[in-house]
Amino acid sequence: MRIGFDGKRAVQNFTGLGNYSRFVLNLLADHFPENQYYLYTPKSPKNNLGIPNCIKYRQPSKLINSTLWRSGLIVSDLKKDKVDLFHGLSNELPMGIAKSGIPSIVTIHDLIFLRFPDYYPYIDRQIYKYKFEYACKNASRIIAVSKQTKEDIVSFFRIQEDKIDVVYQGCNHLFQNQATEQEKQKIRKEYKLPEKFILNVGTIEERKNLLLIVKALNNAVQKNIKLVVIGRETDYAREVKEYIAAHQMHERVIFLKNVPINDLPVIYQSAEIFVYPSEFEGFGIPVIEALYSGVPVIAATGSCLEEAGGPASRYVHPQDEIQLAWQINNIINNPEKRASIVTEGHRYVQKFTENTLSKNLIQTYYKALNNA
């Protein structure tokens, strides 16, 4: 097959949608090298993105506006390249794709902007709704990154269930490598990590609910346990830090920024527990990273995190810091229970192996071709 991809996020984003885009490209290149892959991107790719060398890049002519090209003019280039299938990796498809005769797939990551509209400016919500709904209605097939996202697509956009395939996302293979004790000590020293700590990874925004962990730490968790937070800060971080200051918790909460991907798995593996009490997620890749790293997970109920974490992980209401504190203490004070959670979590996370995910992805591609 000759497969084309919307490459904007793959070459411009270094988190969420960018990570997903690069994950798909690497997955297909590794497991189905016989295909030809074209990445349509409005900007030149940067170095060290980890995009496979076999990917062919396509960009708009300098005479064409890049936004207009990506929104619809790209279709003519897809035809010139004789692309058999086009995959919109980040919730969007170009206008006119359905009439072009080229089968298409769109990945929908979440519809959080419809579930929690207060987190998004009005104009952004309207733009997202138009783009996402157009893509879902005009795609040959839809990939949802979780069962929760599939249910939301059906509910909000009135799309038939049989048009949607749930294909999970895995995480960077680095998280499957076990660090040596020497590597852990090196990372502890470099980042000044405490002896025992809880870990939270993700953008520090209101929906991710970091304040709940801080309150749990303050109210009930034993004093020798600290919290390490890794993520980009938004305005919400100010609220969290004001609580920390008011309760004199400066020494118990450590903020890290711009941690290289090579160091991140070692930090995970050094943690006692990974806590991710997000109000709502499309899937929750950090949970998968923690399970591969051999760390017990405590996440929030109410979205898809139970899908990511599996039955052995622990779940709390996203507004109950006392319940969260109890779960943290219960794991820390019971080494046998912690070991059992780690073992069961590692067994569960095997459903997200690259071999399984690549087969699921290619099956959706063939469905799209057959439906066209």
Image (cartoon, rainbow, N blue to C red):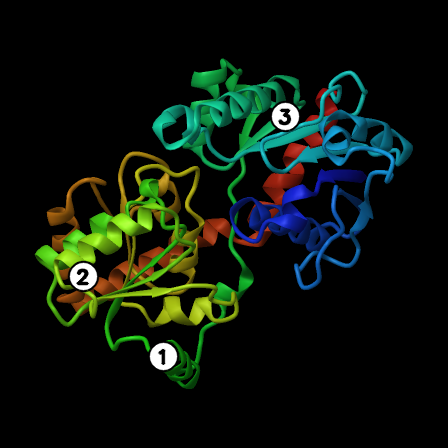
List the residue tagged with mark 3: 141
Nearer to us in this view, 114 or 20: 114
Residue 188 in the image, given as x and y percentages of width and height: 36, 79
Instruction: Give the Cα distance between marks 2 and 3.
Output: 42 Å
Is 280 rendered above or below residue 11?
Answer: above
Q: Quadrant of residue 39?
A: top right
Q: Earlier in the sequence, mark 2 or mark 1?
A: 1
User: Relative to residue 20, is residue 263 depicted above or below?
Assistant: below
Which sits earlier in the primary sequence, circle 2 or circle 3?
Answer: 3
Q: CA distance from mark 2 to mark 1?
A: 22 Å
**Helix, strand or loop at mark 2:** helix
> In the rendered image, which quarter is residue 86 located in?
top right
User: Where does label 2 land, which residue?
Assistant: 331
Answer with left or right where residue 125 lies relative to residue 25: left
Answer with left or right where residue 299 lies relative to residue 154: left
Circle 1: residue type: Arg
Residue at point 43%, 54% (across, down): 232
Q: What residue sits right under mark 1 in the picture?
A: 188
Determine the CA span between mark 1 and mark 3. 46 Å
| Marks 1 and 3, the one that precedes in the sequence | 3
Q: Which quarter of the image is occupied by the N terminus? A: top right
**Few, some or many residues within 10 Å of mark 2 (<14, 14–19, 20+):** many
Q: Residue at x 42, y 61 (%)?
A: 292
Furthest residue in direction bottom, as rendered = 182
**Mark 3 nearby-residue class (10 Å; few <14, some 14–19, many ≥20):** many
Residue occupying the point 79% across, 25% down: 102
Q: Amino acid at mark 3?
A: Arg
Badge 3 marks a residue whose secondary structure is strand
Whether residue 330 is visible: no
